[in-house]
Image: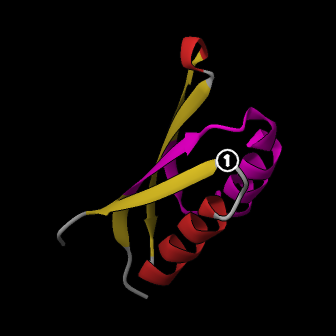
Amino acid sequence: METRIALIGIIVENLDSTDKINEILHSYNSYIVGRMGIPYRSRGVAIISVVVDAPNDVISAMSGKLGRIDGVSSKVQYTKA
């Protein structure tokens, strides 16, 4: 199946949700190329960027699951190719 490279941007406003986020990311670990988390303590949020190489449906499912967590928003940026 054809894969695409994508960047999933995650904003965490409810820091109690981190266990659920990590659970989802772990379940998709075979598609994850790398990830970076930045705690923005003075604003009480965390920003996570995840680079994936996966089929479109896997990327969409992963982003959708992340976005359904309370206090979490998720957006995807795809490569053109």
Q: How is the image coloured?
A: secondary structure
Q: Does 37 sit above or below residue 27?
A: above
Residue at the image point whose x is 63% and y is 59% from the top: 66
Residue farthest to the left? 80
Q: Position of residue 56 (x, y in %)?
A: 42, 79
Residue at horizontal 50%, vertical 75%?
60
Relative side of 70 to 1, left or right: right
Q: Which residue is mark 1?
A: 71
Q: On the rendered structure, is 25 left or right of 49?
A: right
Q: Secondary structure beneath disc 1?
A: loop
Q: Nearer the viewer, residue 78 or 11?
A: 11
Magenta stretch encompasses residue 41: no
What is the magenta range? 7-34
Q: Residue at x 24, y 64 (%)?
A: 79
Q: Residue furthest top?
A: 42
Q: Amino acid at mark 1?
A: Gly
Q: Position of residue 11 (x, y in %)?
A: 53, 42
| Quadrant containing the C terminus in the rendered view | bottom left
The quarter of the displayed image where residue 13 is located: top right
Q: Residue at horizontal 34%, vertical 71%?
A: 4
Residue 23 picture location, percent across and down? 79, 53
Packing grade of label 1 (10 A; few <14, some 14-19, many >=20) is: some
Please state, as top left, top right, bottom left or bottom right, where the N terminus lies in the image: bottom left
> How many marks are shown on the rendered structure?
1
Asked whether 26 falls inside the magenta stretch, the response is yes
